[in-house]
Image (tube, grey):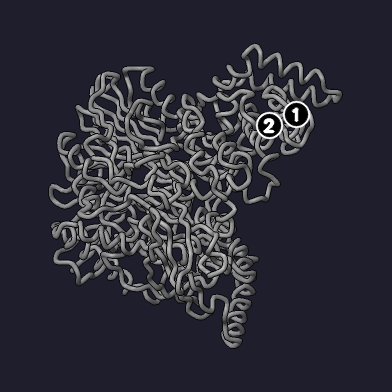
Amino acid sequence: MEQVNRSTRTRESFVRHTTCAVSLLLTLSFVAAGCSSMVARHFQDTVDSPSGTLVLPELTETVTVRRDSYGIPFVEAKSMPDLAVAMGYVHASDRFTQMAGFRLMAQGRLSEMAGPPMLDLDIYMRTLGLARTADIMLKGISPQNMALLERYCSGVNAWLEQHRDRLPPDLALAGYAPEPWKPADTALIFCLVNLALSFNLFEETATLTVMQALGPHKTAWLLPIYPDEPVPAGETGKLDGIDLAGVSGSLSHVGTTQTLLCSLGLGGFAASNNWAIAKARTAGSASIFANDTHLMLSLPSMWNMLHARCGTFDAAGVTLAGAPVIVAGYNGHIAWGMTMVMADNQDLFLEQMKVTNGRVHYLYKGRWLPVAERSETIQVRGGDPVVITVRETLHGTLLNDAIGSDPRNIFQPGPLKTAYGIALKWASLSENDRTFDSFFALNTARSLDEAFPIMKEIRSIALNMVCADRDNIGWQVTGNFPVRTAGRGLVPSPGWTGEYDWQGLLDPSVLPWSRNPAEGFIGTANHRTVGRDYPHVLSSSWFWPERAERIAQMALATDKHTLKSTMGMQLDTRSTFVPKLQEVFAERDLAQGIEQEIASWGDAGMRARARLGLSMLGEFDGDMSSESGNAALLGALLHCVTRNVFLDELGPEDSRAFKAFLLINNESYNATCDHILVRGDESPFWDDTGTTPKETKAVILARSLADAVLFMESRQGKDHQTWSWGGLHTYMWETEASKMSPHMGFIAKSAMGVLKPYFNRGPYPAPGDYFTLNVAGYMMGRDFDTWLIPAMRIIVDFSLDEPMYGVNSSGQSDNPSSPHYDDGIMAWRMGKYISFPFGEDAIKAQYKDVMLLAP
């Protein structure tokens, strides 16, 4: 990839921008030193009033927008085109900063607003070419829905025109002038979210980095698929004999780029719970539906809540700002929601490359073929434009320069002769895709019978769709899944032989589904939803099974489920991992080995610590409440086991190999838990390579128990009665700008540091962990900062007069000066739910602020 004038900047431009930045920093420092509320007051006029009358020439008739005490809107129109206009206006009013940021990110244009720090991310996004994917999506949208999408865009643009001189704080401080909204932008955001929910690219690039340190066979122990499956030695073995040092230059900066992508919510990490309980198991003799999507902790949440009504169209739930559709929710007849399948629908291929007569070629089945090329120009604020060349093989786009900023690239004639290209193949959208139309159709489906064929048409995103009406419950797996000639796609494949090529996509008719099962409930939690004998590869990266086990435990515990009991399930913090751990430590041979190791130590303090750890672990009831000292001990133990077992081979701590391992180890069922629960001394990792004698599992676990207690003493004191999980494990709501600040220049980073109290919220004690229904994932082995949470919660109890309740994980607005910027956080933390009424009297009682949008 050629990169022209990447760091060039004229002296005048540098002086001008630096002077402005220093002035801004001094001003912001002065303001923040007084009170961040001064900043809020300064931008108060950027917050729209919830009541009154506004004229929108785009409308044909008046639309009513009511808002409740949390700012959640109820939008009612007399025609669908007017409803679409109003939804666009409301979305822009609540979330235009988020919409604009997502659009720039998907377009690969963040550098236009934020300057050189975003250049690597822009190169990555331009290389992926989401615009081409969005074009495919647009072609698949029906004329009727395209007309509504165009009306939606007109509503967004009406808001934008009214606010050109009073944009929200993030955009105003950046001096950014947004462009009008187009249907292509909505498609781009949809594709961006799809990318954010795909993770194989990250998994495979990280695996390559680990393999460079360990080799293919030892790496297999770090990639467990599920507790009852062997380590995938055959899969990693396909890279035997390949000099993986040939890709080291390509991966030299992958960690930096992936960290940035993760901070922006594009890390490919997502989970979720959903379930439906049959009417025979409920107190009201009607189905109960629940969904909570697990996404990266962000401010604002990815989701925006809304109720829209027009005649027979009546749907409430979560939306993605930028798209006029309820993604998960309830329409008076059915409730629907999703979790991730954890699908393996992205594969990396290693390509042998060379340059002939100035052209780049790659080897395929004995022939050297020329790569396809396209040029992209990236505008950079405060600098000169950057021109890149994106290259593709028949396996997909070459990512070598898209995952790092190193100016040395493998396409230079010298290194190319022995280096590998890295091509990405992704089963995202196919021609005639109807995913967008399918979500529109779910909004109006009146029964599970109608919903099933609609769900089957969702192809571009691999989801566990759970749906219910009053009398029925159902589950359907959606998405595009590759059919591979060989291998399972867990690690990169050699591309030059053709042995691992795709043979098309799996026929949707063979995807798993269920309807009214005999057990009386359906539940998915990113676990392996099919048996080991299922003949097709859906995933090699399932999540831990514990959340699904807990859903089953609680669903089967009574046949009198209610709204309240379902809320209790979503807020549950009891871990089924704990009794499994206790069983392992109680196993006779291992217990004897641990005790023998402890008894052999000369340090009485460490002996006492290890035995205290054993005692606390043995008495733990598994409730990962924020107040629990035993939960804190468990968290510390998993932290220490991760480091004691794997850091000696992959360290030091700041090495690319260990950072890559932590990424792999925290996105699905992981090596830490697999080694504790399943793998014995046959694993090479139970040996500490820094010592002469060969250690055993018992020895390392004994050391880890003592280390865990020592760790807690260093953090919370020697009195274990005062320890708490929430003192270690916390929530912190941060804006995307705050998350980007470590990658900014000094001035911008300092300015953002000053503004953090205005933009961010927290820290707060966090209950739960990866294994609890009320999930709170953290980077096991690195720190305890919560990054994965239920981004929203929805429950529909069909027996109630007003069936739907829900809550978002942030406020409705993305404007820090709005009273609805953070009010949802407290409701979410306290386990509060908000009613979404459908009856006229209840609507008027709840949505008390009224805005009329008049033509």
Residue 598, percent from left and from top: 77, 20
Q: Are marks 2 and 1 in contact (CB under 8 Å)?
A: yes
For badge 1, the amino acid type reads: Asp
Q: Which type of secondary structure does the marked residue at label 1 adopt?
A: loop
Seen at 14% across and 57% down, the residue is: 78
Residue 578, percent from left and from top: 56, 23
The answer to whether residue 575 is above or below residue 223 is above
Residue 719 - label: 1
Look at the image and tell me in which quarter the C terminus lies.
Answer: bottom left
728 relative position to 70: left or right: right
Residue nearest the viewer, comparing 62 with 307: 307
Residue 47, percent from left and from top: 40, 65
172 relative position to 222: left or right: left
For badge 2, the amino acid type reads: Trp
Residue 133, percent from left and from top: 31, 59
Seen at 17% across and 45% down, the residue is: 444
727 relative position to 315: left or right: right
552 relative position to 854: left or right: right
Seen at 16% across and 61% down, the residue is: 81
Residue 40 - label: none
State how far apart marks 2 and 1 are (Cα).
7 Å
- Residue labelled with disc 2: 723
Question: In the rendered image, is residue 757 in sight?
Answer: no
Q: Which type of secondary structure does the marked residue at label 2 adopt?
A: loop
